[in-house]
Amino acid sequence: MTEPVTWTLDNGIGRIEIDNPPVNALSNAVRKGISDALKALGDERSLTAVVIACAGRTFIAGADIREFGKPRQPPTLAELCDQIERFPHPVVAALHGTALGGGFEIALACHARVAAIGTRIGLPEVKLGLIPGAGGTNRLARIVGAVEALQIALSGDPIDSDRAHALGLVDKVTDGEPVSQAVALARALKQPPVPTRSLPIEGAESAALEERIAKALSKTAGQHAPAAIVESLRRAIALPFDEAVAADRETFADLSAGAQSKALRHAFFAERQAAKFDSPVGSGKRIEKVAILGAGTMGGGIAMSFAAAGIAVLLIDTGTEALERGLARIQSNYDRSVSRKSISADEAERRLARIATATDRASAADADLVIEAVFEDMDLKKQIFSDLEAICAPDCILASNTSALDIDAIAHVLKHRDRFVGMHFFSPANVMKLCEIVRGADTSAATIASAITVARRIAKIPVVSGNCDGFIGNRMVAKRSAQVDRLLQQGALPQQVDAALKAFGFPMGPLAINDMSGLDIGYSIRKRRGTSFPIADAVVESGRLGQKTGGGYYRYEAGSRTPIADPEVAALIEQVRARLGVVPREFDEGQMIERMIYPLINEGAKILEEGIAQRASDIDVVWLNGYGFPRWRGGPMFHAGTVGLSEIAQKLTLFAEETGDASLMPSALLVRLAGAGATFDDWDKGTLRDAA
Ligand code: 3H9
């Protein structure tokens, strides 16, 4: 095996190169390699300075997440950073790609930094439930000040090379490769170099800092890492450097052994795993030309996602009026982004220019991919796809964005069904990351692979789902909705139900969400299917359709989206309870959470059992990216493992007995895993499946 770290000495400049694909993560071997290289170079009499650089696509992207929880070999990253900072000659980092987490901490310990244009730099530890564990926050605050350091460490989002330069984090940005510039800078630096730890922290006592801290903590209640980052910064300000970093290391160890970080690491790997489709075909057909049918909110949002990724799209609708409305909506979305400074006015213009329009389906003739996003009408969709089959090239991929219809029934009109697939985007499609790739009975592996690849190209997180009612996400939501209605029937109020799920970590409660999307949609689906949710039905039948009518489960003041508890709704609920002969009871928050979350875990188990989802972790990805499940709980299936499957199975049996609803009985898979003392993660690893 080749060494992941090598060094050379040329004309007084030592060059340390890390080559540890795919992302040059700081494994035990890499840390030791850098440390040994520094020691060896330090013994060279001709040495005047050192450059640390990486081979491949990126500078060090952080600690090796796969090694967390495994024994660590010396040196620790904090020791290595000290060794760099105390090195008697200047050490310069040559950055390209990404310098993240521990990689950025190494760069901060260097005496100067050169970055290739486009390099992204940051401390994403918070996204893994961690704090920078090797003095990152401390050194960062000494370069950019306390307020900016807090912002960078708490958001976890990378900043680009230009911003890093403006903040004084990188000394030079270069549009070529960064190593030669780093060598030039290394030669010019003073000897002995000034260590970052000796710089003062600006803004340490400022009111702006306290304001930022209060704001950030109020938004991240229940999460351990953000609070720990704030504490780390306070220690950086109050304590001697070594003491503060030693405390950071302890906090890092505690957090990485904790449930929240494990859940977040699970989410990180689950998202990458979800894009892997078990098939011998490669990444599928290269998609260059895309047409979208339907310029409504969904079609427009999908078009914006392609435009953002630099891919031109043709937006097709039947009339110029519909297209104008669609374009106006897109334009106003861009205007909002520009006013929020999330994109520049030039960028908005470039994106808009990538969206062309047409009024006839025949314009889709040379497309490689057509995505249909018209309203949910089976006959209309069938008509569209049979037209498209005649219009488009035989290898054009035909996708439907349906969320509610049977994709095999749509495919039925096609002669070549292998190229037909569901691509279920979530609203607003320009923002939401999830895309369920729905595999019909005849969809080919190559078509699935192409859909996954194109979804990734437009920065979506694809998850493959089998074809069933509601696919993965909405099928599970339906189970939760039934229990929400039952809780209301049995004694809870809308604001209590919503507060329980918000306390669990969802950004919004399910009833406030329903008010936002409109209650008539679910109502008409229930009517079509002949099912009933007594409270939900009564709310709609009283004329309350949600925010659009000024009231649903809540009331809304004119022009406001803030839900306000409404005694009229409480009275309406009372009437339904009386009609059903229910004597209301009280539920505490924990009971409500269990009643809403366990049935959806149970449905997830059935989805796995039926092979609708490839992995339990895929189900988690759906819930994390499409439904607001708190990321720090890892998703419903991971959360089930934290609670214990036998506890969940027992509670579900109890709920089924109490309510007389046999559909709440634990699924066969849940019972089997619970009996084996296993988790869904064990199922994903395949060991239990093989034994079945
Ligand atoms: C840290 O640094 C703690 C320190 O403060 C203190 C320590 C004491 N480790 O995302 P991609 C794998 S915490 C191990 O598809 P991209 C990834 O799983 C760390 N593996 O590529 C995938 O594997 P596979 C702070 C990692 O180009 C492959 O690399 N750092 C790591 O879309 C390609 O990844 C972070 O949180 C890792 N650190 O994006 C950065 N990173 O092919 C996390 C990636 O088997 N990483 N892999 O599926 C990222 O954000 C993105 O991977 C990156 C590249 C932007 C770098």
Image (cartoon, grey):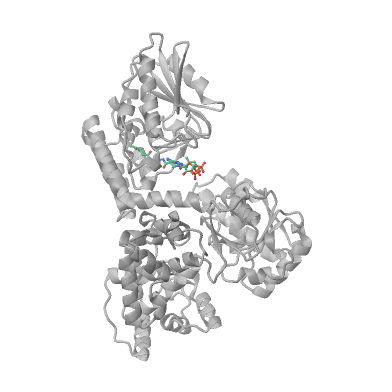
Specify the quarter for ligand 1. top left
Image location (x, y in percent) of residue 213? 30, 47
Quadrant location of residue 315? bottom right
Image location (x, y in percent) of residue 372? 66, 63
Q: Give the answer, above or below, for where 74 lies relative to 127.
A: above
| Residue 496 visible, this orientation | no
Image location (x, y in percent) of residue 130? 33, 44
Q: Residue at x 35, y 86 (%)?
A: 577
Front residue (pair 246, 347) = 246
In the rendered image, the quadrant that contains the C terminus is bottom left
How many numbered marks, from 0 up?
0
Quadrant location of residue 360? bottom right
Q: Residue at x 48, y 17 (%)?
A: 184
Q: Residue at x 35, y 82 (%)?
A: 659
Image location (x, y in percent) of residue 615? 48, 58
Quadrant location of residue 674? bottom left
Front residue (pair 577, 689) = 689
